[in-house]
Image (cartoon, rainbow, N blue to C red):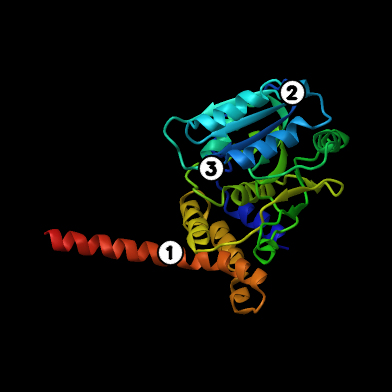
Amino acid sequence: MKTRLLKSLYQLFPFSLKGDAVINSETELAISCIFPTYQRDTDLEVLLRCLAGQGLNKNDFEVIVVEDGMDEKTGQLIRLFASQLNLVHLTNPVPLHNIASLRNQGLKHSKGELILYLDDDTIIPQEYFLSRLVKLFDADLSIGAVQIPGEASYGLWRIKYDYLDRYSFASRCVAYRRSALARIGGFFEQLASYEDIELSIRFTIMDGRMTRAEELFYLHPPLYFDSWKKPLCNGLSFLRLFRRYSKPVWFVCYLNALRFLPFLLMPNAKYRQWGKISAGFVWAPISLIFQKMNHRDKKIIYR
């Protein structure tokens, strides 16, 4: 029902679906694995080992590491795996601190017909993961995206690491056909967070077809917020869409983002984490109002 409503509103109140990515239509490889990283060498090494152990011929896929900065340890890791993987190492001497821009940067330099977005702390245990993923797309050319089920990778305190949505468009592990990304233009780069979910909204609006890879899975540290920083960042990013979406579509998406608010009152800590996400969307406009008030007060004082 939400999908039908979203598409209907877009038909009545259209807006540009084009993101900010520069996408080359020419392809040379089956799949490009793209992920940003920033001084997380232990996690990066685990992921590179997973990709190096894939059964797919290394000449059929590439691994694009987009580094937000220039860290010597990261460079050493890249050189260590250079003979095992078809590696592209992109660096930003001045960190962007913008994951949407980093993912678009990787997309710009990619050569794969398929794009697999990962996080640098994603773990892929299955050696046949990439080959099965390619076959899944090849079996049905109408498929534009594939969701892969995720499982929690546990830390010392397991109770903190039980929270992971099994199926999600979050870019910790999701695959798109290049042609689908070209139609929607990749990510909106003014978003500091929430960029992957926003991309899925435009993918849905353009009537993109998604399927689930039931036989595959990945591991990832699950949803857990020690503070309100991440939920607030999500909310602030969504507010920036107000100028890019048509107002009715934006408002419906905003209401949908609030659906977990009642979970804040539940005794289950897992659901309270989801409640925090929705609360971030409430707190974001309030925080902006306070910022403007403080800015105005400072102007009055300096006068």
Tell me whether the residue at label 2 lies in contact with that at label 1, contact meaning CB atoms closer than 8 angstroms.
no
Location of residue 258 in the rendering, given as x and y in whole percent from the top left corner: 58, 68
Residue at 58%, 49% in the rendered image: 14
Looking at the rendered image, the disc whose residue lies closer to the viewer, 2 or 1, is 2
Nearest the eye: 169 or 188: 169
Horizontal side of 138 relative to 219 (left or right) equals right
Distance of label 3 from label 1 (alpha carbons): 22 Å
Kind of residue at badge 1:
Pro
Question: Crowding at label 1, few (<14), some or many (≥20) Cα neighbours within 10 Å?
Answer: some
The answer to whether any part of residue 98 appears in the image is yes
| Mark 1 residue element | helix
Distance of label 2 from label 3 (alpha carbons): 24 Å
- On the image, numbered disc 2 is attached to which residue? 29
Location of residue 144 in the rendering, given as x and y in whole percent from the top left corner: 75, 40
Distance of label 2 from label 1 (alpha carbons): 44 Å
Horizontal side of 8 relative to 229 (left or right) equals right
Residue at 73%, 49% in the rendered image: 219
| Mark 3 residue element | helix
In this rendering, the answer to whether 5 lies above or below 79 is below
Residue at 53%, 53% in the rendered image: 246
- On the image, numbered disc 3 is attached to which residue? 99
In this rendering, the answer to whether 14 lies above or below 33 is below
Location of residue 106 in the rendering, given as x and y in whole percent from the top left corner: 59, 31
- On the image, numbered disc 1 is attached to which residue? 285
